[in-house]
Image (cartoon, rainbow, N blue to C red):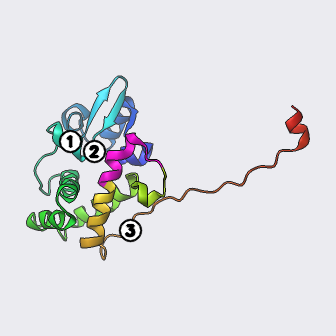
Amino acid sequence: MLAWDAFRAPRFPADEALKLARVVGLDFDQDVKKEVCEIKGNDVILWDRITRHRNGGLRHVSEECMLDVLHWAAKVGREQNTGAARNLIEEAHLTGDPTLLTAIEALLNVLPPGVSSAGRKKPDTHLAGAASDFEALENLRKLAFAESVPAPKIPEQAVLPLMEVEEEDEAE
């Protein structure tokens, strides 16, 4: 979540990933690499729920790791439906867990919103997995947590006025 918040992208410098891991008391090689990301060259690439599942980094649903819970919920929400994702969280007895509620809110505020939410015409393929996770989790928030988790703050694109070019600037 810190990486998404800081870089707003799934790919960023590996040395920054090491610093972020240290800040939260994690050993990058033991706790992060091959669990939620991979290293390519000098960069780290964060995994969405599909990639984590495919690479064996997505563990069982438990209160130990809320990212696992949220990635499982997004996976189930996409493959089945939002009600099944809610049932997954209920069966794990995490519905009212304050850590889960905070995690949902935080993740929704850092992941890129889906195409329909952001009003983009053409999605960025590098962000597609994370945007899909966002949409699945936002649907879950609306269905099961609307009263306890506020809607994500989606930054709007600022419309910048075109600067008028003076005639002498055009001549240069």
Q: In front here: 23 or 70?
A: 70
Residue topped by disc 3: 151
Q: Which mark is residue 48?
A: 2
Farthest residue, direction top: 41
Residue 126 in magenta stretch: yes
Q: Position of residue 43 (x, y in %)?
A: 37, 29
Residue 145 visible, this orientation: no
Helix, strand or loop at mark 1:
helix
Q: Which picture quadrant has residue 88?
A: bottom left
Secondary structure at badge 3 equals loop
Query: Which residue is rendered at x = 24% and y = 72% of the image?
Result: 144
To which residue does mark 1 refer?
52
* Disc 3 to disc 1, C-alpha distance: 26 Å
* Residue drawn at (13%, 67%) of the image: 87
Q: Are marks 2 and 1 in contact (CB under 8 Å)?
A: yes
What amino acid is at disc 1? Arg
Most distant residue in the front direction: 121
Using the image, determine if residue 13 lies above or below residue 104. Answer: above
Q: Please tell me whether mark 2 sits on a helix, a strand or a loop.
A: loop
Coordinates of residue 156 in the picture (x, y in percent): 53, 59
The span shown in magenta is 122-133
Secondary structure mostly taken by the magenta-highlighted segment of the chain: helix
